[in-house]
Image (cartoon, coloured by chain):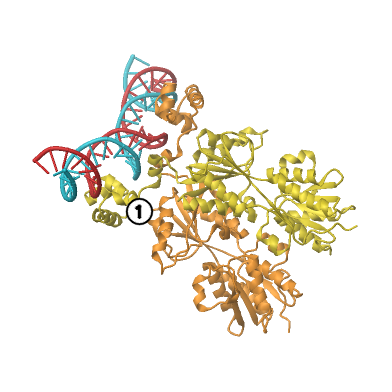
Chain colours: A yellow, B orange, C cyan, D red
Amino acid sequence: MVRVTLKTVAEEAGVSVSTVSNAYNKPDQLSTAVRERVLATAKRLGYAGPDPAARSLRSQRAGAIGLLFTEQLSYAFSDPYSVGLLAGLAQVAETHRTGLLLIPLEHFDPSRPQDAEPSAQAMRQAVVDGVVAYCVDADHPAREVALERGLPLVSTIDDADERQRYVLIDEEGAGRALGRHLRDLGHRSVGIIVDGRAPLGEARVVRPEDEADLFVDSRARLTSLRDALGPQATVTAVFAGHNSQEAGAAGAAFLLDRQDRPSAIACISDVLALGARDAVHQRGLEVGREVSLTGFDDIPRAEAVGLTTVRQPIAEKGRLLGRMLLDPDYTERRVLLPTELVVRSSTGPAPR
Amino acid sequence: MVRVTLKTVAEEAGVSVSTVSNAYNKPDQLSTAVRERVLATAKRLGYAGPDPAARSLRSQRAGAIGLLFTEQLSYAFSDPYSVGLLAGLAQVAETHRTGLLLIPLEHFDPSRPQDAEPSAQAMRQAVVDGVVAYCVDADHPAREVALERGLPLVSTIDDADERQRYVLIDEEGAGRALGRHLRDLGHRSVGIIVDGRAPLGEARVVRPEDEADLFVDSRARLTSLRDALGPQATVTAVFAGHNSQEAGAAGAAFLLDRQDRPSAIACISDVLALGARDAVHQRGLEVGREVSLTGFDDIPRAEAVGLTTVRQPIAEKGRLLGRMLLDPDYTERRVLLPTELVVRSSTGPAPR
DNA sequence: TCGATCTAGTACAACGATACAGAAAGGGTC
DNA sequence: GACCCTTTCTGTATCGTTGTACTAGATCGA
């Protein structure tokens, strides 16, 4: 049983291979009569159209872009935030008739360089025209491979590399706005819940040596929040595992059950904040009065529960990442997206 | 500026192209000395390894499988359930060094066959070795294209096609178990909240003509639930948009504010049930006493809030889908995965 | 010492398409 | 009728690999 190819169809229809190819790709280059005859014989022979792999090789175009991410897939997409980004990206990809290839990588630990091979391999094998590095550490080897391959690379984390392009969120501005908001409300003791690579375990105060285990975004937000709250505030950063409601609840429980309960809890994501909210409720406390609560991202649920948060134009971020790779007219190399503080009922003046 | 290929490297290193190829793919076919020289020159020339597109063509292997789905991406992955499946699938793909290509399709409306072209096109262009059809209607044209291309196709919806393989969930069994549970608790008036293609609008009772707009899974669950509750029960199926907490809340609000409030509300997914739970609370009613509530899927949050639900081995489903495509030793053509009723505090005896 | 087997490498033909140059036929213009 | 332009189609080179068949030399057992 032989495969049906352009050649088979051409012979059967009594035309040249070029003509069959054109029948599919350049319909205006041939008469309708011939075109229809060709397509008819193709159908008769069970030919499903030009082989995409062969086309990729010849036309030097893969018809897909890759999405690199380092966390396990189930964590990476457990947050509506990530899904929003993915959706924005897919939207642009679709209009460019381009696929989206997921490329899960392992987290890169510089002290174990040999573990990099599977990730590098995955990046070498991917049939793509360009790559989006989504929250992939700057020193991850897969980036280097992508650049070696000469693939356009767009990143969400700034590492000042001339060869890459960037779509960034103004994390510092966001942290500043949140911090100032809390400070203006009189909060002098603030708990911060951050997420990180380690799975949910005992919630605990973040030690300096833990910082490497935090997600890159979390790190930036934590720093700018601390700065904005100023030196007179007492800040307790708590680490409670992956980004999940459970982790948020655990982190908040830890903070609330301490002797010196903070008057406000700032969570590094809305998902964490939703969990924290449950913990506050469970203790019979009122959110926004006895404990102020903030999130980050403005996912749909945030509005529903009145969560003060920072809005990120997340779908827009996804779309820009896509456009940078796919739209040749979009030449910007570096975009910093603004964020917006959205004040809702979960924050209020610090109780005296 | 010319591209660096196997040939370039071969000439520079003074060996044949085959040898360079072997240096990458069959390290034991050549001496370490030559291999190292080859790799060194490759590095010097900036050669990033064999081009995956060319390899795909030559070896007739794409190194990726496609995931077809018909809903908008942001809806498709807004549920932890879908993400769980994706994670299971990705896990198997990874062990087989295979990528995962997302192929979003448009919903197929048989009355508008011309709209099928973009979807069919996307399926024709995808460089994949096989395809998972995830909740894609049986008559969707993209399926036909995949089969025309001779691609192995694994599906999550039964349509009794010899050419396909299936991983199914025992929806009927699940519906029966849930229905019997509610019946045994004495519930004679049950509201069912289903999701569907139409966006969140006014919640309303499902009319027969709406059924086509429901998601396929929802349809099956609705039917078996109805059957299991038996003829003496009053069943009100309510339709409230996409699968989201908001839709669940809206659907529950509709049911709870009716004159003849049902004593139990069964939701077609846990996400809907979480929203319904909020609506029940908001009305000052107690879940499990005044109103019983059930979900479907057993997502992590379900346990946290004590939701009675049906557990689906979702990651296992994803893994099986992957194995069917990638593991040649796995020859099963049709798997029916069992479900398990998980009774928690959200259901209790019907109040008299 | 001789054929047999093994090792390390080479040469060349695919894989299935598209790009590009060119040819044949038809039509319009002067 | 010569000229040029369009339209429609053909022929061939090429994209960058890998598989297969082959060769030269080394190794080995009897």
Name the chain letter of the residue that bears numbered label 1.
A
Q: Tell me where residue B135 appears, x and y as whole percent.
A: 51, 62
B270 relative position to A332: left or right? right
Q: How many marks?
A: 1
B286 relative position to B252: left or right? right
Residue at coordinates 81% horizontally, 57% vertically from top-left?
A292
Q: Tell me where residue A280 appears, x and y as whole percent.
A: 81, 60
Q: Nearer the viewer, residue B129 or A285?
A: A285
Q: Tell me where residue A125 appears, x and y as whole percent.
A: 49, 40
Position of A226 relative to B287 (above/below): above
Q: Tell me where residue A78 appears, x and y as whole percent.
A: 64, 54
A101 relative position to A224: left or right? left
The reply to whether residue A94 is in sight is yes
The quadrant of the picture occupied by the N terminus of chain B is top left
Q: Nearer the viewer, residue A345 or A287?
A: A345
Position of B296 relative to B317 (above/below): below
Q: Nearer the viewer, residue B249 or B29?
A: B249
Position of A88 relative to B344 (above/below): above
The residue pinned by badge 1 equals: A48
| Residue density around tag 1, few if under 14, some if 14–19, many if 20 or more, within 10 Å | some
The quadrant of the picture occupied by the C terminus of chain B is bottom right
**Quick one: SS at disc 1?**
loop
Identity of the amino acid at label 1? Ala
The reply to whether residue B341 is in sight is no
